[in-house]
Amino acid sequence: MKIEILKSIVYKGRNKLDIDKFEMFLGRFNINIHKLFKFIIDNNLHDLDFNCLKEIALALHKKLDVSWMIKDKFDWAQMQEIRLGLEKRLDVSLYAGPEFDWTQMQEIRLGLEKGLDVSSYTKPEFYWAQMQEIRLGLEKKLDVSIYARTEFNSVQMEEIRLGLEKGLNVSIYAKPTYRREQMRKIRLELEQKQAIKKIC
């Protein structure tokens, strides 16, 4: 099928300015336009917005397994996180699902890039900020099981993580009933006691 026909199908009903921007994008990356448009039509993707089509174009250009990006109704930011994972040869099956938004996907991808066992936080019930706190703890080789629980919000997790980093007995304040301010007060008191012990 000629490229003009393929383009007419993909561009039907779209804004000319958006089309021009998309064409400029394709030109910058020297993408095989015929292959791209044929892929879009063959997989019934022509209703996707241009940001999604850009991610697909980049993935095809880099010869990545695009099936991960189109298996569910992902937005462009989710597609980007999957593409970035594919580029690094990560196991994107751990996060390429509609149950994760792009911020959650990003935290899982960052953990995989560091070679971490992300199983403790690849749970959709964790917000991205909770995932981040667990990831930071794993990076420091901490026992994240103490706070990798949904009953702790991200700021509570942070206070527990900071205590673990200092070698404190966080069990004293690692309780969901404590607010962040209470946790911080206890943590700072424990740090002070620890510092005094070192001096004596």
Image (cartoon, rainbow, N blue to C red):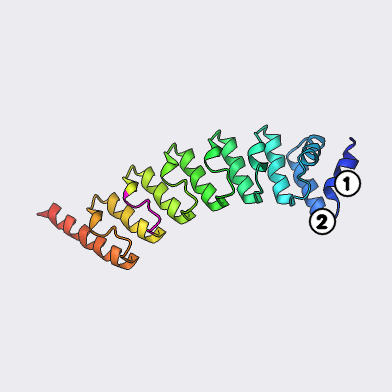
State the extent of the magenta-drawn residues as a range: 146-152
Q: Is residue 51 left or right of residue 124?
A: right
Q: Which one is nearer the viewer's eye here, 149 or 17?
A: 149
Question: Which three-letter amino acid code belongs to the residue tagged 2?
Answer: Leu
Q: Nearer the viewer, mark 2 or mark 1?
A: 1
Label 2 environment density (alpha carbons within 10 Å; few <14, some 14–19, many ≥20): few
**In whole angstroms, how far apart are the C-alphas of marks 2 and 1?**
15 Å
Q: Quadrant of residue 118?
A: top left
Residue depicted at x 14% and y 52%: 198
Question: Is residue 165 depicted above or below 190 in this figure?
Answer: above
In the rendered image, residue 159, in percent from the top left (x then y), is placed at: 33, 58
Label 1: element kind: helix
Examine the residues drawn in magenta and state their main secondary structure: loop
Residue 134 among magenta residues: no
Residue depicted at x 31% and y 45%: 143
Residue depicted at x 83% and y 57%: 15
Q: What residue would you read off at disc 1? A: 8
Residue 33 circle label: none
Q: What residue would you read off at disc 2? A: 17
Q: Which one is nearer the viewer's eye here, 83 or 68?
A: 68
In the rendered image, residue 186, in percent from the top left (x then y), is placed at: 24, 63
Q: Is residue 164 left or right of residue 115?
A: left
Q: Is residue 167 left or right of residue 3?
A: left
Question: Is residue 17 depicted above or below 23 in this figure?
Answer: below
Residue 148 among magenta residues: yes
Residue depicted at x 68% and y 44%: 55
